Image (cartoon, rainbow, N blue to C red):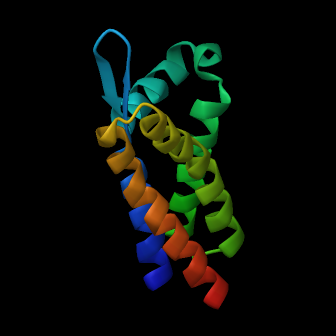
């Protein structure tokens, strides 16, 4: 049960990453993901980029583990890796630009990821 709860928390915390860029533009990851999924059916070539495909695959892998008994370690690690790449870069961008809003939205995922890895290594 704890494994599934951690995987669910990984999915949920990944959706609240926050990004800002020039011109006053800003977006949460759940908003960006909605736009990517909508565009996937109308113009799939425009959304094929590692920073869009890998996190979505990571979320799907973690979602699959919620229906497994027991959740697969390999799928969990792969899901963390797919999402971790994007959220680590978001955290790094926030740190380099000293934008604490960006950094604070990535920290929950990174902390839960470390706790999850620690949990699965103890199993």
Q: Residue at x 42, y 66 (%)?
A: 8
- Tell me where residue 13 sits by quadrant: bottom left
Figure check: 54 above or below 52:
below
Q: Residue at x 48, y 59 (%)?
A: 110
Q: Position of residue 25 (x, y in %)?
A: 32, 17
- Residue 123, can we see it? no
Figure check: 66 above or below 92:
below
Figure check: 48 above or below 120:
above
Q: Position of residue 14 (x, y in %)?
A: 43, 50
Residue 49 falls left or right of residue 107:
right
The number of numbered discs placed on residues in the rendered structure image is 0
Nearer to us in this view, 5 or 19: 19
Figure check: 1 above or below 60:
below
Seen from this angle, which residue lies furthest right?
A: 74
Q: Quadrant of the N terminus?
A: bottom left
- Residue 115, can we see it? yes
Q: Residue at x 40, y 55 (%)?
A: 107
Q: Residue at x 65, y 54 (%)?
A: 81
- Tell me where residue 111 sits by quadrant: bottom left
Nearer to us in this view, 84 or 4: 84
Nearer to us in this view, 40 or 50: 50
Seen from this angle, which residue lies furthest top?
A: 23
Q: Position of residue 120 (x, y in %)?
A: 61, 81
- Tell me where residue 18 sits by quadrant: top left
Q: Position of residue 100 (x, y in %)?
A: 31, 42
Q: Quadrant of the C terminus?
A: bottom right
């Amino acid at each position: 049960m704890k494994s599934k709860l951690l995987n669910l928390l990984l999915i949920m915390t990944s959706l609240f990453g926050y990004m800002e860029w020039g011109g006053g533009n800003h977006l949460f990851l759940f908003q960006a993901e909605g736009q990517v999924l909508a565009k996937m059916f109308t113009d799939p070539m425009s959304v094929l980029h590692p920073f869009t495909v890998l996190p979505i695959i990571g979320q799907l892998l973690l979602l699959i583990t919620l229906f497994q008994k027991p959740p697969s370690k390999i799928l969990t690690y792969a899901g963390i890796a797919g999402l971790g790449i994007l959220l680590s870069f978001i955290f790094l961008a926030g740190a380099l630009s000293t934008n604490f809003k960006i950094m604070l939205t990535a920290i929950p995922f990174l902390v839960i990821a470390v706790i999850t890895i620690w949990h699965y290594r103890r199993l």
